[in-house]
Every structure is written in C-alpha cells, then in structure tokens.
Amino acid sequence: MRPWILGGLGALALLFGLGVLITMVPKRRVAAEQESCKNNLKSLSLFAAHHAKPPKDLPADKLRNEIPAGTIVLPGVAPESRLSWLVDTLPGLDQRRQDTAAVLAAIDRTQPWTSVRNQTAARTRLVVLLCPGNPAHVDPEQPAPTQYVGIAGLGVDAATLNFFLPAPAPPRAGCFHYDSPTPFASITDGLSQTLLFGERSTDLGSWLRGGPSTVRGLDDRPDSPPLIGAGGQFGGNHFETSNWAIADGSVRSFTPRVDRGLLFGMATIAGKDHDVIPGE
C-alpha cells in the first residue's frame, strides 16, 4: 500500500479517536456532576441513613429518632424570619470537606436569621448545598443560597401542618414542618417511600433562612408549574433527571416523565389512604 494512503488512514483513525474522546469527556463530566450531587444529598441525609441502618460503632445516644423541625422556633417570629433546619444539621456534616463547625459557632440561635450577628454565617458558601451540575451564583456580599430543600408534604402550605405525638400526622404532611420535628416512627408510609430532600435550580433562598427558602411542599394545584425540569418546581440542574433524598438516607433520580401521583404520594409521611399512587 502506498505511503500516502497509509498516512491518510492514520489521519482518519486519529480524527475518529479524537471524535470519540470529545464525545466521551462531556458524558463523563455530566456523570461525575450527577454523582457529586447525589453525594451532597447523601451527606445531608446521613442522619436518616443512620436511623434506618445504625452503624455498629455509633453510640445509641448519637442516633436521631426524628427529623428536625423546619425552623429554629422563636416565639412571635414568623417562619421565614427564623433560622432554618440546616443549623441543626451542620454538626453532622463532614468537617474535613468544610469547617461547618466554625460556621455553627458564628450563629446565634436566639436571633432571627437577618440579625447582624448571623450575617457572617449567612454569607458563607456551603459546598454541600450547591449542585455541581449547575451551581448557583454566590455573591460574597449576599446571603449564600441552597439548592436543596426539605420536603414539607403535599400543597404549598404543607409546612404549616405541624403535629405533635400522639396525634396522627395530617394526610398532606411531609417530613418537614415549621414548628415541630417529625419522629421517624410517624412515617407510616415507609422510610424508603418518603421524600426527604429535593434539588432546585430556580427561586432559591438563603440556606440560613427558614420558610420556603429551605422547606417546600409539592404544589399540586392544577395550574402549578411542572414538578421536574428547567423552570419547574424541582430539578433543572441535570439533563432529563433530578435527584431526591429519601427518608431512609438513600438517593433516587426521577425524570420529568415520572407520574405526578407517584411523587405526590411520596411527598407525604402518612397519606396512603389519600394519595393516588400507581400500583396501590
């Protein structure tokens, strides 16, 4: 075979190899971002994973038996002016990844989130709260946002459906409520079938702020935005998928094609007699 033909075949092979490499690199990056997002959710829900499957080396008094209240309750202060549930979660995060203990030390639990004392912490960017696939812009002069929120149940007012044992949970209630913690024992729909956290890409709020910034119910009104996708209630950070933490500490992914009834059912902790879930 003539040398120029061999050279041409070599060039074609090189171009083909480069084409494959160019195609593979973005796919690997997307896969890595998706996995990192899941790891963030796993970190946030570690207390739930420990409850569902207690580690042998973790003392019983270190296990949480309840999901924290959606806010740090301050009498006479509205939920959106209080500190968020994340304040109670900071001690359990991986301190090697970021010194959240120092952030916690800068927070005054007796003051609203807007107090001068709490603004240094509010402006601190917490990497575990930002999705690597589409990280929210963080202005160093403004409160840092969170892209992960606690699931309050079904309906925009679900976070107000507080209940205290032994009273049964309202049918629309989810894992997070503004004024009361949620005992794991009250999740009668099953830990593995109940949404704990969801990721968002729009309408973000400060991670330190209580209210809708950090706790939201699934909007089930007929004219509500799509549940998942760009411009939807959740997701929008990854192509054709969204990540959710479950009450047993696991993480699942759903696409915009998921049946709304399925997610509506998984948003509640004790609503099986009221939710329309395929297969029930």
Image (spheres, rainbow, N blue to C red):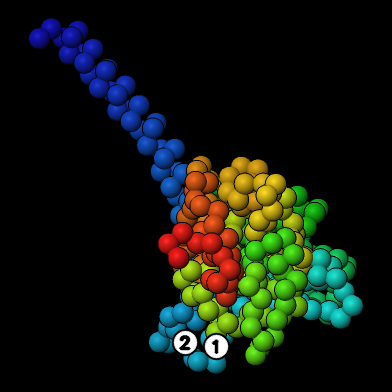
The disc placed on residue 223 is none
Q: CA distance from mark 2 to mark 1?
A: 7 Å
The amino acid marked with disc number 1 is Lys
For the image, the number of numbered tags is 2
Contact between marks 2 and 1 (CB within 8 A): the answer is: yes
Please tell me which residue is depicted at 53% across the width and 46% down the height of the picture: 256
- Can you give x and y, in whole percent of width and height, for residue 48 in the image? 52, 76
- Can you give x and y, in whole percent of width and height, for residue 30 in the image? 46, 44
Q: Residues within 10 Å of mark 2 (few under 14, many from 20)?
A: few
**In the displayed structure, would residue 188 be above or below residue 37?**
below
- Can you give x and y, in whole percent of width and height, for residue 233 in the image? 65, 51
Please tell me which residue is depicted at 86% across the width and 81% down the height of the picture: 75
Residue 5 is left or right of residue 102, and the answer is left
Q: Which residue is mark 1?
A: 62
Q: Residues within 10 Å of mark 1 (few under 14, many from 20)?
A: few
- In this view, which residue lies farthest toward the left? 1
Residue 207 is left or right of residue 187, and the answer is right
Q: Secondary structure beneath disc 1?
A: helix
The amino acid marked with disc number 2 is Leu
**In the displayed structure, would residue 25 be above or below residue 201?**
above
Quarter of the figure with the C terminus = bottom left
Closer to us: 95 or 223: 223
Q: Secondary structure beneath disc 2?
A: loop
**In the displayed structure, would residue 9 be above or below residue 88?**
above
Please tell me which residue is depicted at 29% across the width and 24% down the height of the picture: 16
The disc placed on residue 58 is 2
**In the displayed structure, would residue 202 be above or below residue 263?**
above
Quarter of the figure with the N terminus = top left
Q: Is residue 135 visible?
A: no
